[in-house]
Image (spheres, coloured by chain):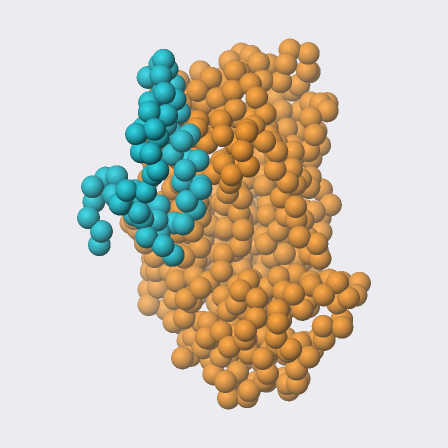
Amino acid sequence: MSDLTLTPNIDNADDFYADLLEAHEGLEKSDSEALNARLILILANHIGDRQVLSQALNAAAFKMEE
Amino acid sequence: MNKIFETPMYPYTRSPDQDAPVPVRHQVVIIGAGPVGLAAAIDLAQQGVDVVVLDDNDKVSFGSRAICFAKRPLEILDRLGCGQPMVDKGVEWDVGKVFFDEREVYTFDLLPEEGHRRPAFINLQQYYFEEYLVDRVRELQKEGANLDLRGRNKVSAVGTHPDHVTLEIDTPEGSYNIEADWLIACDGANSTLRAMLGKDFVGRVFEDNFLIADVVMEADFPTERWFWFDPPFNRGQSALLHKQPDNVWRIDLQLGWDIDKEREKRPENVIPRLKAMLGDDIDFELEWVSIYTFQCRRMEQFRHDRVIFAGDAAHQVSPFGARGANSGLQDTDNLCWKLKLVLDGKAPETLLDSYDVERVHGADENILNSTRSTDFITPKSDTSRLFRDAVLDLAEQYEFARPLVNAGRLSVPCTYDGSPLNSADALAGPARTRPGSPCLDVPLGDGFLLQELGDRFTLLTIDAEAPDEIVEDGVTVTRLALSVKDDPTLALKERYLGDAESGVYLIRPDQHVAARRATYDDNLFRAAIRRATGKE
C-alpha cells in the first residue's frame, strides 16, 4: 500500500498541462466531458491501488483524511 | 396451444382437516407453492417432517419469470432429488455478448471450472421449474411422506402464539382453521402474510419499467446471453435476449418510467418493438408478455418467533444477476435442517436465529450487487451516464474496462463469513472452502463429492484418521473418508487441502463448511458440532 502523491511529481508540468488542454481543443462540451471520463478511468486503472484511489477521491472533493 | 401454466397442477380437493372438530396441528405449514415454498416442503418432507403447503392458486408460474438457475441452486435441487430433470430440460450457456449502440463491445465466457457435476447456469422457464418440483412432491407422497399440497387455499387470518401459529384458510367450500408449530412464509414479494403481521419491508424503489416477452421462434441466434445498452431499436434504454427450452426466447426491454403500462402490453405495441429488435423477416409468436418494475429491499428480520420468511417474501432484488429464486433456494437450504433439529428437540430454538444472521447477510450481498447492476444499466444522473458510456466505449478497445461493465453480476453462492455457527479456521487451506463456505464439488470415480454430502452432518477426512461416527448431544456426524488419490484430477487436493498434507472438515446438512483442521481432535470437533447446532 502506498499513499497518494500530493507534492509535485510531473516532469515539465507546463508541457503536460498544455497536452491536457490540447486534447480538449475544438471539442464540444459533451465530447470533452466524455474524454475526461475516459481519462479518469484509464488513470484509475493505471493506479490500481484502492487506497490511493480513495485518497484521490477525497482529495479532489477537498475532504480531509480521517 | 395448450400452455402448461394454464393447467391446474394441484387443483382444490377437500382435506380431512376441513371436517375436523378442532383445528388440526401440523409441524410445519408453508404459505406459497412457488419455487421457494415447494423446495422447503420437499426438504422437510424428505426428513420426515409433517408439512402442509397452502397456495391461493392451483397452477404453476404464469409465464417464464425466473429463468436463470445457477450451479449452487442446482446442487441444492440434487439434494432434494429433482436436479436431473431441470438440467435435462434446461438450456446450458456460458457465453455472453455485450452491445453498445450498434456495436458489439465484447464477448465473455464464464469458463466454468472443470470437475463440477452441474453447469454454471441453465435457463429454464419457472413454470417447468415448478412443475418438476410438484412432480417431486407427488413422488414423495407416493413414498408415504407426510406432505400435503393444497391448491386454492388462501390464508385469510393468522394468529401468533408463543409455541404455535393459527391460520384461517378460505377455500371454494368455505373456510377452516389449522395450527402449525412453525409457519414458513414463501408468498412472494407482495407477501400477504407480511402485511397481515404488519412487518416492514424497506428499501429502494427503482423508477423504471421493463417489458418482458416470451417469444416462440425458429431462430439461429446462438445459445448466449445478449445484452444491449442504448441499442437503435430501444434508444436510451437496455435490452436482453436469452434462450429458453422449446424455442422460447426471453426478451427484456427497458421502457423507462413514464409509460402507460396497459398500452405498452398490447400486442399491437409489443410486436413492432420486437420486430425492430429481431428483424422483419423472423416469424415469431408471443407466448407471454408482462411489464414489471422492481425494488431492492428486505425485511429487517426474517424470523419472527414461530413465523419465518423466505425468498422474495423476505427480500426482493432487481432481476439483474438472477438473484431472486436462486437466493430463495439458498434460504430454504439454510433453514430446513435447522428447523428439523429444533423440531426433534436436538437443538435450541435459538439455532433458528442463525438463519436470520446468515440469510440476511446473503440478502444484503444480493441487494448490493443487484443495486450496483441497476445503477449501471439505468444511470440515475447525467454524470452516472457519462461514466457508464465511457466504460462501454473503453471496453470495446481495452481489456481493463471490461470488468467494469455491469449488466448483472450473476448469482454466486454466499459464504457465511462471521456466522455464529462457524468455528475458527484451523487449516492453512484454500480460502474458498473456509468455514462458512458452501462445499465445492469434486469428481470422485463415477460420481461427485456433493452427492455424498448433505441431509446430515458429515465429517470429511482427507488422508486423516477419525472415528466413523460421532454422537454429540443427540446430533450424529458420519465420517466420509477420502484420500487425495481418490481424485486423479487433483481437484480434491486443490479445493480442500491446498498446501496442507491432510484435512478434516465438519460439514453441515446444507453442505456448508462449519469447521476444519489438519487432523481430528475429539474435544475440538465436539465443540464445533455444538457450535454448529447453536449450543455454544
Output the letter for the chain in cyan. A
Q: Is residue B221 left or right of residue B308?
A: right
Left or right position of B32 against B383: right
Nearest the viewer among B421 and B126 is B421
* Viewer-proximal residue among B222 and B263: B222
Q: Residue at x 71, y 75 (%)?
A: B482
In the rendered image, the vertical position of residue B333 relative to residue A16, given as above or below? below
Residue B163 screen position, x and y as percent:
37, 69
- Specify the quadrant that holds the N terminus of chain B: top right
Residue occupying the point 58% across, 39% down? B67
Residue shown at 51% from the left, 77% from the top: B426
Image quarter hosting the C terminus of chain B:
bottom left
State whether residue B344 appears in this view. Answer: no
Residue B447 at least partly seen: yes
Q: Position of residue B423 (x, y in %)?
A: 46, 75
In this structure image, what is the colour of chain B? Answer: orange
Instruction: Place residue B191 in its image quadrant.
Output: top left
Vertical position of residue B302 compared to residue B500: above or below: above
